[in-house]
Image (cartoon, rainbow, N blue to C red):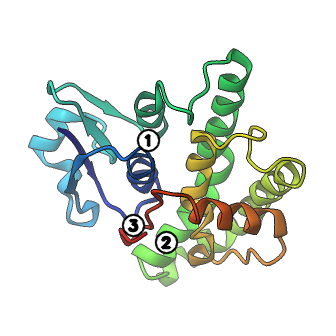
């Protein structure tokens, strides 16, 4: 059975849980508490030298790190990862966008607020993330205003990649009320068969 090492409250880990749930794929979830340093243990570092979560361990013991790499591996052969070359490039385009233009703002602001409790020494950093986060949300809004999903008419792992932190963006101080297309997109995904939330509930 597949084993996933992660924390469901982490958007990067939740991406994997959501895809596995939508696929109806059985797996074992091994919780890793990063605040307790569990991802820096010698045992974990032997599996992932980078010491980060999530990590996918295959049935034969091989491992794959980095959330979007894991998504691409798991989605192979499914409707969530089309074979057509251009569509695959668009998926990668949005996944790179997520890692470089979305997560560094929205996920980091959420981490400072939700995980750390917005300590005074990091409040300025938290505030500094707001403009970049709204810039990323505006880019998504423009795309979702002209197509139901990020790469067009088909729901793909590009949407899963961006859904993970967008649907909890309010926990990082981002008000989504000004983004109607994003809100419609969020509702459509949450209503999908096989959907699971961060709390593990459908």
For mark 3, what is the residue?
A: 9
Tell me how far mark 3 sits from mark 1, CA to CA: 14 Å
**Which of the labelled discs sits on residue 112, or is there none?**
2
Q: In the rendered structure, which disc, 2 or 3, sits on the residue that comes first in sequence?
A: 3
Q: Is residue 103 above or below residue 178?
A: above
Name, please, the residue furthest toward the top.
85
Near mark 2 (Cα within 10 A), the count class, few <14, some 14-19 or many ≥20, is: some
Relative height, residue 121 to residue 103 (above, below): below
| Foreground of the two, 26 or 44 | 26
Q: Secondary structure at mark 2?
A: helix
**Disc with the residue nearer the chain's start (3 vs 1):** 3
Residue at 82% x, 69% y is 179
Q: Is disc 1 placed on a helix, strand or loop?
A: helix
**Residue 39 horizontal side relative to residue 149, left or right:** left
Q: Secondary structure at mark 3?
A: loop
- Check the image and report above or below for 105 versus 42: below
Residue for badge 1: 67
Mark 1 surroundings: few (<14), some (14-19) or many (≥20) residues within 10 A: many
Farthest-out residue, front: 193
Instruction: Tell which circle, 1 or 2, labels the residue nearer the N-terminal end.
Output: 1
């Amino acid at each position: 059975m597949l084993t996933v090492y992660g924390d469901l409250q982490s958007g990067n880990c939740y991406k994997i849980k959501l895809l596995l749930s939508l696929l109806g794929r059985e797996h074992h979830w091994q919780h890793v508490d990063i605040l307790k340093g569990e991802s820096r243990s010698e045992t974990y570092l032997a599996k992932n030298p980078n010491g980060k979560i999530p990590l996918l361990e295959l049935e034969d013991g091989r491992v794959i790190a980095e959330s979007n790499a894991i998504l691409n591996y798991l989605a192979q052969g499914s409707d969530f990862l089309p074979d057509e070359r251009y569509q695959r490039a668009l998926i990668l385009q949005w996944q790179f966008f997520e890692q470089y233009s979305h997560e560094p703002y929205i996920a980091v602001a959420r981490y400072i607020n939700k995980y750390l409790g917005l300590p005074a020494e990091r409040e300025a950093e938290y505030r500094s993330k707001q403009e970049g986060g709204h810039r990323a949300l505006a880019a998504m809004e423009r795309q979702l205003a002209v197509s139901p999903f990020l790469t067009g008419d088909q729901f793909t792992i590009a949407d899963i990649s961006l859904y993970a932190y967008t649907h909890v963006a309010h926990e990082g101080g981002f008000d989504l009320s000004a983004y109607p297309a994003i809100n419609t997109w969020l509702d459509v995904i949450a209503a999908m068969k096989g959907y699971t939330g961060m709390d593990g509930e459908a």
